[in-house]
Image (cartoon, rainbow, N blue to C red):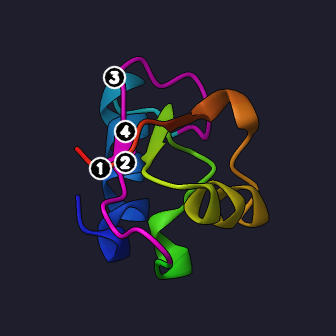
Amino acid sequence: VHPLTQDIPLKILNYVDSSGKSRKSGRTTPFATVVTDLGGAHPTWFNPGVDKCFVPSDALYKCARDRKVKPEQIVQLGLP
């Protein structure tokens, strides 16, 4: 998903997963972000509402943390 559209799919999934009763938590459909830039990325790549955020480097791990993504959500694997 393009970084500028992460909020919209997450909101839609919250709505769909709750049988039409919108809510902020309780989503059952997994949602992941894969960041492929090595040294820097736009802040919108990092949304704390994702289940997993895959990053290729220490620099991007720090960017994710700076944007409030929790360590247990971040997976550092290198480039896919």
Q: Disc 2 designates what residue?
A: 33
Q: Disc 1 designates what residue?
A: 79
Residue extent of the magenta highlight: 23-39
Q: Disc 4 designates what residue?
A: 32
Three-letter amino acid code at disc 1?
Answer: Leu
Q: Disc 3 designates what residue?
A: 29
Q: Quadrant of the N terminus?
A: bottom left
Q: Earlier in the sequence, mark 1 or mark 3?
A: 3
**Is 36 above or below relative to 79?**
below
Compute the Cα span from label 1 to label 3.
Answer: 25 Å
Q: Quadrant of the C terminus?
A: top left
Q: Earlier in the sequence, mark 1 or mark 2?
A: 2
Instruction: Determine the image quadrant of residue 8.
Output: bottom left
Give the structural element (helix, strand or loop) at label 1: loop
Three-letter amino acid code at disc 2?
Answer: Thr
Instruction: Name the side, left or right, on which 75 lies relative to 29.
Output: right
Q: Earlier in the sequence, mark 4 or mark 1?
A: 4
Instruction: Determine the image quadrant of residue 15.
Output: top left
